[in-house]
Image: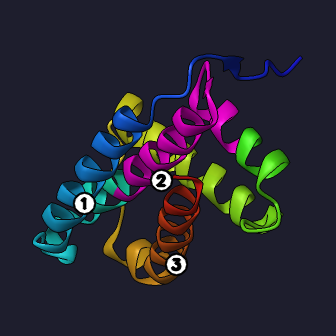
Amino acid sequence: MESKPRIVKPNPPMASSILRLVELRLQMLAELDPQRFATFIVEGYYEVCKELITALLTIEGRKAHDHRELIVHLEQHHSSTITRQECVSLDRLRKQRNSIAYRGAFIDAGYLILNEAWIRELIAKLQQLVIVQF
């Protein structure tokens, strides 16, 4: 049974702080060599997506129990902006990140080349979604 994000007091200052961290993380990722650091770039892109969804829930007055719940909430409550396919792809990215974090997996630069465009598009959509909620 899927749990639902619990209701908390909306916290726009926290969401704003998360947005600043996202910007710093994106600047850092842009400086990394994709051939040498594809693993860290993929992991970083997932973290950016997770942080943006967390900021969105923070504005909405919700708190997720885990990363999967963030994606489910996005799919269920923001389907007019984020497609089901984007949520499915984001969940695959979550699994890639988990493989990196928990199993020491490495990501080939080819994966980044094939997936970076849609990931960056999703990040832009998530950023816009958060900004609109303010």
Q: Considering the numbered disc 1 on the image, is that residue within a helix, a strand or a loop?
A: helix
Q: Residue at x 47, y 37 (%)?
A: 98
Mark 3 and mark 2 lie on one chain; the one further toward the N terminus is: 2
Mark 2 and mark 1 lie on one chain; the one further toward the N terminus is: 1
Q: Are marks 3 and 2 in contact (CB under 8 Å)?
A: no
User: Mark 3 = which residue?
Assistant: 121
Write down the region rendered in magenta: 45-71
Lateral position of residue 116 relative to residue 5, left or right: left
Q: Is residue 67 magenta?
A: yes
Residue that lies at the very extreme toward the right in this rendered image: 1
Q: Considering the numbered disc 2 on the image, is that residue within a helix, a strand or a loop?
A: helix
Q: Nearer the viewer, residue 52 or 42?
A: 52
Q: Relative to residue 122, is residue 68 depicted above or below?
A: above
Q: Are marks 2 and 1 in contact (CB under 8 Å)?
A: no
Total marks shown come to 3
Q: Residue at x 83, y 22 (%)?
A: 2
Mark 3 and mark 1 lie on one chain; the one further toward the N terminus is: 1
Q: Nearer the viewer, residue 22 or 128?
A: 128
Alpha-carbon span between mark 3 and mark 2 = 11 Å
